[in-house]
Image (cartoon, rainbow, N blue to C red):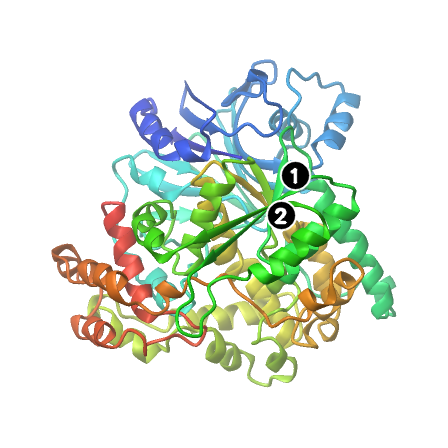
Amino acid sequence: MCGFSGEIRFDGRSPSTRRLEKAAGVLASRGPDAGGVFVQGNIGLGHRRLKIIDLSERAQQPMVDSELGLTIVYNGAVYNYPELRAELEKKGYRFFSSGDTEVVLKAYHAWRERCVERLNGMFAFAIWERDSRRTFLARDRLGIKPLYYAELEGGLTFSSTLPALLAGDGIDTDIDPVALHHYMTFHSVVPPPRTIIAGVRKLPPGTTMTVEPNGQRSERTYWELRFEADAEESGYEFADWSRLLRDELERAVDRRLIADVPVGVLLSGGLDSSLVVGLLANADQKGLNTFSIGFESVDDVQGDEFRYSDVIAERFSTRHHKIEVDSARVLPALDRCVQAMSEPMVSHDCIGFYLLSQEVSAHVKVVQSGQGADEVFAGYHWYPPLMESSQPVDDYVRVFFDRDHEEFLEAVHPRLADGDASRSLVRRHFDEAPACRAIDKALHLDTTVMLVDDPVKRVDNMTMAWGLEARVPFLDHELVELAARIPAELKVREGGKSILKEVAREIIPAHVIDRPKGYFPVPALKYLRGEYLERVQDIMLSPRARERELFDPGYVDRLLGAPESEITPLGGSKLWQVALLEYWLQRHDI
């Protein structure tokens, strides 16, 4: 796991080493173990390294293969690299390192842009061809690893984080009005290629981009998730799907053990992370480090789920680390948490993951996480009503959107008000999704869009803020493809994730499976009171916020006057949502 940046010139000028060095400073937490810069011809590449696979200096980046004329910067983990290496060696390739970076580089030489189709894992990378001066950029199928880019006068710059791009000059930092609509409406999800910053874009998941030396760019989508069973699976019953699912889960968890350092687990006490622990224990992983975090409760909102995580830790004899955080610790950490966000992310559990990652990074450098199972296996409450929906767009919007278009128009400055971009996005996606039923259209949207730019991005940003690599077995693309083929009826019943729960009964205690659905609560950010409310007031009433004219003053005053009554359908604070965006802009000096 690492962070990288680059600059490609189309005008004959040399890339700016100053830009690369400034970006490297921003990326340092993603790669605290080593760093390097490469500049040649029309390309400049910078890299910060977190040593996980091949701890030697032979795997240092930017990695140059002079014999092949290729240079790579790479972020991620390709779990099937040993198999790919063996295949490449049979083709005659010679290796000077023992990790996955060189395998990706030589896979590109062997199979060019189609190399990504052979990679199982999470990745974003850039490869420069010395002789053609062509640059190839790629992102993994589920968008687990980020890749941002921005146009410059006479060039293009790219990086693992948006703030690293802003460390250089020449980027348009105006607010993108369409992205603002998504942020305020689509639960703070801004789908690619947009970001909240008009001049910065992100490469969509499952996509590659080839940049020619004259600046011409072409994109190719190499993966699409389809919701239909294979012909031979058409007669499968529950037991058949369960057997396939159990096998695929075991493979997904086992793949993510590949590392030259110990691997732990983030254990919330919910079904998903508990199942990961159980699968690892069944695979004979001894002395597994597990980590849980809890906060003080506010009113009837419970701040921890230790009673469930304790059960799993005791059942599988893990080395359990229980981290209790009082509210006094949350507020001082907020500045650094917001600073760590590549894009503004409103979910309360960002601070939870941030503080948890701080503690975990003192013990291990790699963890597995249960993120993604709710989207992949239909665990949310809005899925069952869509089973028989005749108006799927309306039904989805009603339960998922944070506010309707009319309230959005009340909330923002008139110059930023336009059409109902978020409803249009959902309608377009439902029309184009490779799925026939309303429920499958919603699952496709959530798995390929919402999941990427909310939970997945959140985990990546908060863990990498402390040089911690998070691996997500539920987003193994082969597991996700299997889940999409399983009939929706076998997923949504019994409150959701039905088939996953039945597989889990063979592995973990039933009362952990049948417990009420939990979240990662940080009550102090849902019910803003005391010092937290004062912080929000300082942000929203500051001269910078007033001068920016992003939000309507009357709307802001309304939220400040009744912060606890203005809650979104999904249980978030509307005040925190608007404040977080302004907070993020100020922290990044935008």
Q: Can residue 276 be seen in this view?
A: no
Residue 264 image offset from top left, x and y in percent: 62, 42
Mark-to-mark CA distance, 2 and 1: 8 Å
* 223 vs 56, nearest the viewer: 56
Q: Specify whether 98 is left or right of 294.
A: right
* 297 vs 353, nearest the viewer: 297
The relative height of residue 262 versus residue 504 in the rendered view (above or below) is above
Q: How crowded is mark 1: few (under 14 residues within 10 Å), some or many (20 or more)?
A: some
The image quadrant of residue 493 is bottom right
Residue 441 image offset from top left, x and y in percent: 61, 70
The image quadrant of residue 418 is bottom left
The relative height of residue 167 versus residue 507 in the rendered view (above or below) is above
The relative height of residue 336 versus residue 492 in the rendered view (above or below) is above
Residue matched to label 2: 222
Residue matched to label 1: 114
Q: Can residue 188 be seen in this view?
A: yes
User: Residue at point 73% right, 46% down?
Assistant: 280
**SS for dot 1:** helix
**SS for dot 2:** loop
Q: Specify whether 46 is left or right of 419.
A: right
Q: Which amino acid does label 2 sit on?
A: Tyr
Q: Residues within 10 Å of mark 2 (few under 14, many from 20)?
A: some
User: Residue at point 28% right, 34% down?
Assistant: 168
Tell me if label 2 and label 1 are in contact, CB under 8 Å.
yes
